[in-house]
Amino acid sequence: MKIINALKYGFRLATLNIKLWSLLYLVNLLFAGLVVVPLLCYLGDKLAFTKATDRLIGGFDFTLFNDFLNQNPEFLRLLSTQTIVVGFLFILLYIFLTGGILTRLKNMETDLHRLGNFWTGCGKYFWRLLRLSFYFALIHFGIAGLFFTVFNWSVEGGLDYFTSEAAIFYRAKICLAFYGFFALFFFMVHDYAKVLVVTQNRRSIFREFWGAFGFVIKNIGTTVGLYLLLFGVFILISFLYGLTDGLIHRMSIPSLGLFLTGQIYVLLQIGCKLMNLGSVVKVLKDS
């Protein structure tokens, strides 16, 4: 019952915050535009806006893309550099916005129609949430390193020891499954810690770090059940988007249809995130 009530509360928070939903979508759209437009201009300049450009933009053509890379090797360097920089900036932007989102959800019942507290929360909690994210990033790197070490140890000797590659692949799947479990667990703890940082409003984040860890362990049935349910909703939306995307390509629908479908998917992703954080707020409030 707690899981269903939390899910309903998260859905209610997401649907009532249309202004916040729209604002987050616009921020994502502007950020994506800053990333994509320079690349499209580069492609347009190199391909002179021929039909080849449409083939690259409208649907992936491996042969054309491979020929393009052979003729323009600097594009791969540009793309890899931009990916690293953009990824880092997007993480900072996401952390910045999270403080505002949680402030908004925290004060929703008393201040529903104004976004002033959103921007206040973005600035107020940015450095605390950034430090928290840094600590959890260290945890995730540690987990990845641990399971990579375990995998290397389990397949030591390679094909000189094992009868086939299937045995090595089987151990890789086992290690990957356990890594995925622990990674998802700490992603969940991170969400609860973020909510505690904003609701408790303390300068030190270590109490929230351990508080979230203890809370998740103490309420393991509710927290894990809710997280798996929300994760299932996200997977379902992604699966439906993949089916729709493939259908659009097969039916040769103009690129505008593909763009609109992608934007709907982005909106639903934002809604899932709001619902997730709203559900966490509810679980903490009722405990």
Image (cartoon, rainbow, N blue to C red):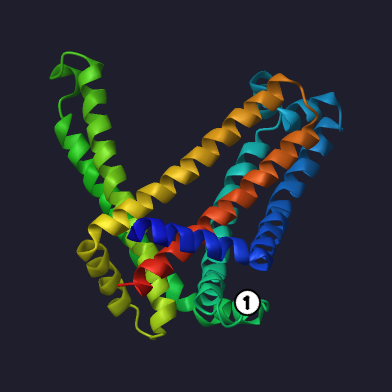
The answer to which image quadrant residue 148 occupies is top left
Q: Residue at x 74, y 33 (%)?
A: 57
Q: Position of residue 146 (x, y in %)?
A: 22, 48
Residue 191 in percent (x, y) is at 40, 63
106 to 98, vertically: above or below? below
Q: Residue drawn at (21%, 14%), measured in percent from left and top?
A: 164
Please give the residue where the numbered disc 1 appears in the rendered image: 112
- Depth check, front residue: 258 or 51: 258
Question: How many labels sit on residues?
Answer: 1
Considering the image in quadrants, where does the C terminus appear? bottom left
Is residue 120 toward the left or the right of residue 42 in the image?
Answer: left
- In the depicted structure, whether residue 275 falls above or below residue 57: below
Q: Is residue 196 toward the left or the right of residue 149 in the image? A: right
Q: What is the x, y in percent for residue 92?
A: 54, 65
**For this rendering, which residue is in front, 264 or 174?**
264
> Residue 117 appears at what percent x and percent y?
60, 81
Question: Which of 106/45 is in front?
Answer: 106
Q: Is residue 132 visible?
A: no
Against 75, is 212 above or below?
A: below
Q: What is the residue that sits farthest to the front in this orientation? A: 1
Q: Secondary structure at mark 1?
A: loop
Q: Quadrant of the N terminus?
A: bottom left
Q: Residue at x 20, y 65 (%)?
A: 218
Q: In the rendered structure, which amino acid carries the disc numbered 1?
A: Leu
Q: Is residue 225 visible?
A: yes
Q: Nearer the viewer, residue 3 or 214?
A: 3
Residue 217 lies, with reference to residue 59, above or below; the image says: below
Furthest residue to the left?
Answer: 161
